[in-house]
Image (tube, rainbow, N blue to C red):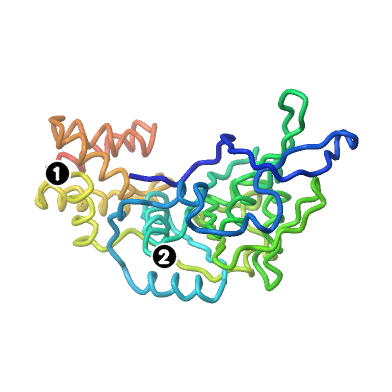
């Protein structure tokens, strides 16, 4: 069960009082106002972001050790790798392993700084400040995971800069507040290098604030174990799915923008487990999502026929 949250606006109000900058004569309530809110991992807010059930994850190298060292040294971490190769699952696993809350933000081109920091909302006769996901993570000592960071606006990603050096602070200009990060706060970002372009790339001023881990699809035996476990199918079928994925990944240079991800193999396994014929499952879960090109579809279907 995943308890990490894609940012929503549900809030629990605390009675810390601030002056409303929109209406100076009016008092406003603020969510988690003041440094006292940095407190406890056992607070209801933090408990709501803890992952209760251990995620299934197979290590591919020394990535677990490096994450733990980065966490202990308060160094932000950057994960690079293709779509569906296990970056998000790794972060969930490390959140569980370190017993830290996890707040996930799915980045996109319309993500503004206020979406991360928070904003004032009008409620009846009050103006209520609502912390954004980044601010909440900073206060409670959570791992803040910014997924597909290159999709966000460049003027938005700049807000994390003071959190990723020795200052470890977050400036909330609208409140005139400088928040010192909780000692256990950590920033983790991820992106797919295959989607980089002049318009969608991390600025060097951002990149050089992180240590980096490179992910790829697992080696065949491990990937088959993952597909078998997550899809609840036998190893024989899982190995054939992985073989199919390997052949598809080898034809990327012939028009596919991305190879078949481990995630797609798990989807195929799950619907095979529920009675969908193998060929149909492979077409629906693997071939169709990868491309709309009729010629490539024919090639992919031939690969399915060859393997199954």
Binning the other alpha carbons within 10 Å of mark 2 as few (below 14), some (14 to 19) or many (20 upward) gives some
Foreground residue, 305 or 168? 168
Per the rendering, the mark at residue 98 is 2
Please name the residue shown 41% across and 65% down the image.
98
Give residue 61's position: percent from left, percent from top: 33, 72
Q: Are marks 2 and 1 in contact (CB under 8 Å)?
A: no
- What is the tally of numbered marks visible in this picture? 2
Per the rendering, the mark at residue 70 is none
Binning the other alpha carbons within 10 Å of mark 1 as few (below 14), some (14 to 19) or many (20 upward) gives few
Of mark 2 and mark 1, the one earlier in the sequence is 2
Please name the residue shown 31% across and 54% down the image.
55
Say left or right for 292 vs 228: right
Calculate the distance from the C-alpha at mark 2 to the C-alpha at mark 1. Answer: 44 Å
SS state under label 2? helix
Q: Residue furthest front?
A: 15
Please name the residue shown 55% across and 63% down the image.
186
Say left or right for 264 vs 114: left
Q: Nearer the viewer, mark 2 or mark 1?
A: 2
Please name the residue shown 67% across and 66% down the image.
168
The quarter in which the N terminus is drawn is top left
Give residue 262's position: percent from left, percent from top: 30, 50
- Please say if 103 is above or below 119: below
Q: Quadrant of residue 35?
A: bottom right
The quarter in which the C terminus is drawn is top left
Give residue 143's position: percent from left, percent from top: 51, 58
Q: Residue furthest top?
A: 124
- Please say if 268 is above or below 186: above
SS state under label 1? helix
Give residue 301's position: percent from left, percent from top: 23, 36
For disc 1, the marked residue is: 306
């Amino acid at each position: 069960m995943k308890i990490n949250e894609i940012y929503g606006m549900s809030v629990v109000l605390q009675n810390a009082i601030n002056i409303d900058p929109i209406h100076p004569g009016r008092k406003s309530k603020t969510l988690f106002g003041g440094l006292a809110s940095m407190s406890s991992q056992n607070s209801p807010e933090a408990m709501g972001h803890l992952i209760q059930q251990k995620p299934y994850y197979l290590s591919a190298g020394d990535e677990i050790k490096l994450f733990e060292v980065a966490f202990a040294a308060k160094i932000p971490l950057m994960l690079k790798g293709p779509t569906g190769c296990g970056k998000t699952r790794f972060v969930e696993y490390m959140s569980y392993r370190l017993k830290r809350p996890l707040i996930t933000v799915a980045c996109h081109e319309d993500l503004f700084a206020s979406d991360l920091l928070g904003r004032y909302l009008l409620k009846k006769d009050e103006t209520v400040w609502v912390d954004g996901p980044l601010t909440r993570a900073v206060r409670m000592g959570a791992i803040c995971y910014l997924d597909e960071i290159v999709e966000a606006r460049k003027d938005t990603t700049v807000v994390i800069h003071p959190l990723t050096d020795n200052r470890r602070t977050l400036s909330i200009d609208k409140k005139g507040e400088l928040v010192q990060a909780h000692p256990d706060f950590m920033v983790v970002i991820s992106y797919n290098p295959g989607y980089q372009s002049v318009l969608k790339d991390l600025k060097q001023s951002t990149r050089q604030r992180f240590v980096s881990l490179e992910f790829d699809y697992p080696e065949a035996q491990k990937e088959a174990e993952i597909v078998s476990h997550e899809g609840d199918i036998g190893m024989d079928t899982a190995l054939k799915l992985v073989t199919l994925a390997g052949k598809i990944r080898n034809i990327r240079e012939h028009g596919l923008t991305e190879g078949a991800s481990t995630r797609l193999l798990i989807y195929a396994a799950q619907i095979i487990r529920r009675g969908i014929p193998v060929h149909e499952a492979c077409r629906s879960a693997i071939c169709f999502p990868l491309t709309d090109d009729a010629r490539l579809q024919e090639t992919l279907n031939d690969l399915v026929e060859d393997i199954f």
